[in-house]
Image (spheres, rainbow, N blue to C red):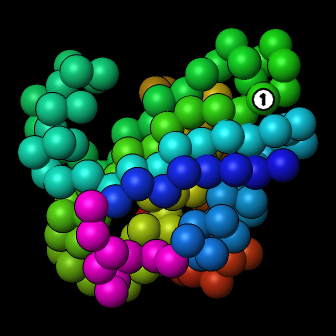
Amino acid sequence: MLKFNLIRDKVLAHQPARSQIDKWLRKSLQKKYATVILSISFVSEEQSQELNYEYRGINKPTNVISLEYASTRDEFGLLSGELILCDEVIVREALEQSKPILAHYAHMLVHGALHLQGYDHVDENDAEMMESIEINLLQKIGFENPYL
């Protein structure tokens, strides 16, 4: 069972619809979880910077912040957490990288969902594995390799 709250101040035409987010999240699940409960927020650059500093000690806005609750995942098969996406950063990055905005949103949601499941890119081997999974998942939902 997948349930998620979607929190955004305003809905912008370039942002993914709830149904797209649902599809992308479902495809991103790498294991069978009894329950998946997430909170997904679209925030401003100012909010992203504040949260990035509070949770990661980095004083700048970022595209996605994943806050995982690993103890419930490992102990109860319950995947829960938060994905905090910064619209302004995602749009800027997409334009800089000459990618469709929706494709970059899909990448950031997949990337964030993998973090919630314990994947990381701290060392080179982990990064290669995570990128490979992202590429495969994004292709399955109709997007090109985001690392080209």
User: Taking the image as drawn, is residue 121 in sight?
Assistant: no
Residue stretch rendered in magenta on the structure? 9-17
Q: Tell me which residue sits at (51%, 68%) in the image.
A: 106
Residue situated in front as seen by the camera: 122 or 43: 43
Residue 26 among those drawn in magenta: no
User: Taking the image as drawn, is residue 51 in sight?
Assistant: yes
Q: 1 left or right of 80?
A: right
Q: 127 left or right of 15?
A: right
Find residue 61 and report its horizontal and vertical position in percent: 16, 44
Residue 11 among those drawn in magenta: yes
User: Considering the image in quadrants, where does the C terminus appear?
Assistant: bottom left
Around disc 1, counting alpha carbons within 10 Å, would you say few (fewer than 14), some (14 to 19), or many (20 or more)? some
Residue situated in front as seen by the camera: 148 or 86: 86
Residue type marked 1: Leu
Find residue 76 and report its horizontal and vertical position in percent: 84, 19
Depicted 66 relative to depicted 108: above or below: above
Q: 52 left or right of 17?
A: left
Residue behind mark 1: 78
Find residue 37 and report its horizontal and vertical position in percent: 67, 40
Depicted 8 relative to depicted 75: above or below: below
Depicted 37 relative to depicted 50: above or below: below
Find residue 68 and report its horizontal and vertical position in percent: 55, 27
Q: Tell me which residue sits at (22%, 21%) in the image.
A: 54
